[in-house]
Amino acid sequence: MTKRHGYALLAAVFAMIVAISGAIYVGVAADDDTGGTRNATADNRAPRDSAAPASAGTWVGTWSASPAGAEPGTETNGMAGRSLRNVVHTDVGGTEARITLSNLYGQQPLNITHASIAVAAAQNDAAAVADTMRRLTFSGSTTVTVPAGAQIMSDAVRVRIPRDSDVLVTTYSPTPSGPVTYHPHARQISYAAQGDRTEDLTATAYTEQTPHWRYLTALDVLSDESVGTVVALGDSITDGITSTEGANHRWTDVLADRLRAAAGTGDVPRYSVVNQGISGNQVLAEGLGRPADNPSGLNRLERDVLGRTNVKAVVIDLGVNDILRNQGQVDPVTVTDGLREMVRRAHARGLRVVGATLMPFGGHRGYSRSRDAVRRAVNAEIRAGKVYDAVVDFDKALRDPYDPRRLRADYDSGDHLHPSDKGYERMAEVFELGDLKGAAPAEL
């Protein structure tokens, strides 16, 4: 069997996996301005003024995080009897907002009896600005039950969400509903409180801190600042695992700042940026379980890219973990073919795809000359224009010019794999913003 024929079989297998995952993980039509089809049940009708009437603007993603697994220690009771206050940072602002909650890794229904959204009083703070506190509803109800393996989008609520600010999304569940679907390595502290403190304006009750985001996977806004969303799909480098906590120094944060500052000038599109990085993520392989912990890029493309709100383009930075985490010698053709399959699926939805070269990891515990040769072979295909519509050359931008097998010292966090804050900033600086604009080609 040739490598190409072997990959054809591989692609077919992954297509079947994605189909099965789609049956398990019933998604919402997130790019539907009406809020999409809900896949949960609701009761207890809310006051009339809790949801907002439609107004002018475009629905876009202003923040998101990929559900990555089940939080350890929450298998039995979940977070029963606690208010979970997730702190998230917006990209663009808007006049209305809606959220998505996920019970993907739950093994029993998640009963939410109270949920709210508010603008944070200060950065990295659990206190809210008083006149921004809003009760959230789901199909008109303040109570919602999210089945195991499902997600739910809230109704739109009228609230002014500022650009480049912290927002508090709080949920309360009185009954056991474990395990908790979460995103580890948030690089942002969120909070929890005993009892239903969902609409508390002060931070007094929120004495528990967590480095995770729980249940919350997306915040959308009705915006007049943006006409579409860019999704960054990647691993720990996109997740920003070594960036300064609470400072929003991931490369995607800096890219969002650049797009906001230059929006509408020249060929720069008016797009928001959302981050769908999962630490340890690979193009092909994934964790155990069904649904899989840390699902492969191929598996989660539908959920984390195509299912996001009003997506216009995707940036893919994956492949390093396929090289580092496989005990045997990974074939570079296998990696690039997997990336091409992702591009093909994105093109089928009309999305433009920008891809990143793989940065060096000399000095890292997983380094070997043979693995570096695979990385360089993958990069050669990417640079030759045989994988993506456009290329951002992170390798060239961050490698040591005197030892190209390594990151430049000031761009290195110290583990010789992940960038420092300065390195993340450099990644965003070399991004050609105009590359995000344009239709997907019929065939690459």
Image: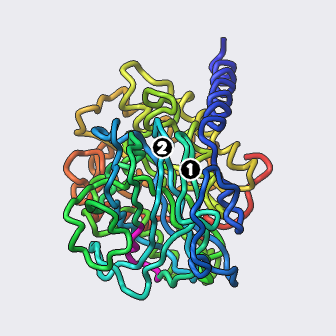
Identity, as a three-letter code, of the amino acid under mark 2: Leu
Looking at the image, which is closer to me, 268 or 36?
36
Q: Could you tell me which secondary element the residue under label 2 belongs to?
A: loop
Residue lying farthest to the right in this orientation: 442
Tell me the residue at 54%/40% (across/down). Answer: 149
Q: Residue 101, position in %: x, y? A: 50, 55
Left or right? Give the position of 27 relative to 405. right
Residue range (magenta): 162-169
For disc 2, the marked residue is: 318
The answer to whether mark 1 and mark 2 are in CB contact below 8 A is no
Tell me where residue 336 appears, x and y as whole percent: 57, 35
Residue at mark 1: 151
Name above or below for residue 391 compared with residue 107: below
Residue 432 visible here: no
Does residue 24 sit above or below 238 in this rendering? above
- Apparent side of residue 377 relative to residue 48 in the rendered image (left or right): left
**Cα distance between the residues tagged 1 and 2:** 26 Å
Front one among 63 and 361? 63
Taking the spot 38% from the left edge, 74% from the top edge, the residue there is: 199
Q: Quadrant of residue 46?
A: bottom right
Residue 84 pos. (x, y %) = 34, 60
